[in-house]
Image (tube, helix red, strand yellow):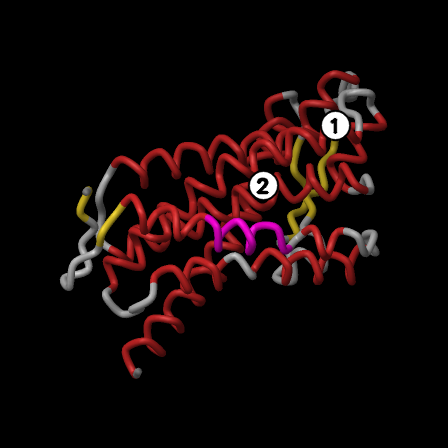
């Protein structure tokens, strides 16, 4: 029991730290990279510890001749684009390379936050435009329908990838006996994030019941994994 409490405390602490790093990647490496690329300067950075209740921001000043409309569009999409690239690279690394559980846990959380940040923007923005998605829709780059479709497609792909990575990480710790329950409980983070976002941004209430879909998918996903893999007493998965 004591080991489980220590693991859970460490797991959540790493998650919070990686959440902040994910925000830095979205704002500074994402939006800020394109601001600098197009000759602008970053004047101020605000990384919110309360995201998704309160957003993070960067303030920038354009070059003397200003940003062209197409440059403004790249700046707006930069946070989503860079975050998606980072999460794809991290997920591929974690799927095909073995590492110790502290490293895999840290990279898993970073992959999760750089996944949920842009996907959350796309899905929630597809339901009711806000933030970067509203900016892109106003510029004619996106529509609500496209944002929602792209967000849902990326979510489904990453859901199975991240669940598989989490399963392997939990098995490495040998602390949680029922890995299935651990995966299901983890995905309850989506309804929680959605609820916080509803309070902070006033998103439609229909978003809340939709946010439980990952939990239901986790229930369906883990029995499938159990049919494909058999775990002996040492906790190592063995292919039938």
Q: In this view, does 26 lie to the left or right of 59?
A: left
Q: Residue at x 56, y 60 (%)?
A: 189
The image quarter containing residue 72 is: top right
Near mark 2 (Cα within 10 A), the count class, few <14, some 14-19 or many ≥20, is: many
The range drawn in magenta is 212-220
Instruction: Measure how far apart labels 2 and 1 are at the Cα level.
Output: 19 Å
On screen, 70 above or below 96?
above
Do tag 2 and tag 1 residues touch (Cβ < 8 Å)?
no
Near mark 1 (Cα within 10 A), the count class, few <14, some 14-19 or many ≥20, is: some
**Residue 139 appears at what percent x and percent y?**
82, 23
Q: N-terminal of the two: label 2 or label 1? A: 2
Query: Is 48 in front, or is 92?
Result: 92
**Residue 56 appears at what percent x and percent y?**
67, 50
Residue 217 in magenta?
yes
The image quarter containing residue 123 is: top right
Q: Which residue, as the protein is rendered here, is positioned at the far bottom? A: 2
Residue 26: which numbered mark, if any? 2
On screen, 165 above or below 39?
below
Query: Is 149 in front, or is 213?
Result: 213
Residue 62: which numbered mark, if any? 1
């Amino acid at each position: 029991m004591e080991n489980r409490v220590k693991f859970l405390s460490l797991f959540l602490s790493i998650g919070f730290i990686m959440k902040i790093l994910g925000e830095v990647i979205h704002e500074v490496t994402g939006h800020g990279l394109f601001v600098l690329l197009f000759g602008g300067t970053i004047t101020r950075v605000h990384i919110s510890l309360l995201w998704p209740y309160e957003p993070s921001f960067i303030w920038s000043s354009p070059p003397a001749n200003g940003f062209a409309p197409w440059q403004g569009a790249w700046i707006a999409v930069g946070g989503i684009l860079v975050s998606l690239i980072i999460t794809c690279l991290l997920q591929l690394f974690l799927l095909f390379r073995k590492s110790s559980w502290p490293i895999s846990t840290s990279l898993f959380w970073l992959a999760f936050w750089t996944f949920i940040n842009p996907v959350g923007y796309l899905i929630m923005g597809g339901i009711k435009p806000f933030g970067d998605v509203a900016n892109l829709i106003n510029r004619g780059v996106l529509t609500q329908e496209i944002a929602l479709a792209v967000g849902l497609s990326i979510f489904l792909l990453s859901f199975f990838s991240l669940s598989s990575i989490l399963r392997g990480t939990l098995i490495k710790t040998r602390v949680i006996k029922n890995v299935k329950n651990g995966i299901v409980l983890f995905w309850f983070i989506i309804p929680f994030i959605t609820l916080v976002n509803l309070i902070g941004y006033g998103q439609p209430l229909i978003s809340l019941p939709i946010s439980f879909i990952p939990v239901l998918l986790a229930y369906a996903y883990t029995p499938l994994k159990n049919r494909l893999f058999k775990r002996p007493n040492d906790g190592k998965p063995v292919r039938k």
